[in-house]
Image (cartoon, rainbow, N blue to C red):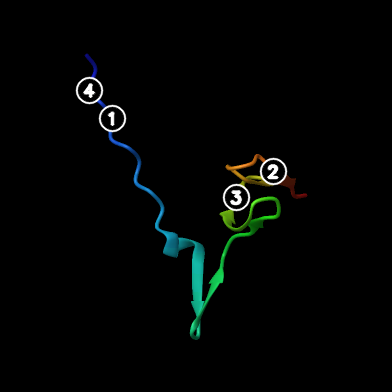
């Protein structure tokens, strides 16, 4: 039987925010379909939501 592979390390939630003064400002765009709390993944030339599949293409 093959040995199980270790799961990749999860991204820290704090990596998605930048602290300005006493407020946390999101660094990535939220998904317009899913709403607050679901960030869109940044790919080359597009933004994609991993939850609902919504995609925005950039030029």
The disc at residue 42 is 3
Mark 1 neighbour class, 10 Å CA radius: few under 14, some 14 to 19, many 20 or more = few
Q: CA distance from mark 1 to mark 2?
A: 30 Å
User: What separation in Å lies between label 3 and label 2 (alpha carbons)?
Assistant: 12 Å
Q: Going by the picture, which residue comes out furthest to the bottom? A: 21
Q: Residue at x 40, y 58 (%)?
A: 12
In the image, what residue occupies the spot 64% across and 51% down? Answer: 34
Residue pointed to by mark 2: 54
Disc 1 vs disc 3: which is toward the camera?
A: 1
Disc on res. 5: 1
Q: Residue at x 75, y 50 (%)?
A: 58
For the N terminus, the quadrant is: top left
Cα gap from disc 4 to disc 2, whole angstroms: 36 Å
Query: Looking at the image, which residue is at 77% across and 49% down?
Result: 59
Q: CA distance from mark 3 to mark 4?
A: 32 Å
Please tell me which of labels 1 and 2 falls first in the chain: 1
Q: Which mark is residue 3?
A: 4
Callout count: 4
- Determine the CA span between mark 1 and mark 3: 26 Å
How far apart, in angstroms, are the residues tagged by discs 1 and 4?
Answer: 6 Å
| 49 sits left or right of 21 in the view | right
**For the residues carrying marks 3 and 4, which lies nearer the camera in this image?**
4
Q: Secondary structure at mark 3?
A: strand
Judged from this view, the residue extending furthest toward the top is: 1
Q: CB of mark 1 within 8 Å of CB of mark 4?
A: yes
């Amino acid at each position: 039987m093959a040995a199980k592979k270790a799961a990749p390390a999860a991204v820290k939630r704090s990596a998605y925010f930048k602290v300005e003064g006493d407020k946390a400002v999101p660094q990535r765009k939220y998904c317009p379909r899913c709403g607050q709390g679901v960030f869109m993944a940044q790919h080359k030339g597009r933004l994609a939501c991993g939850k609902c599949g919504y995609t925005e293409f950039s030029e």
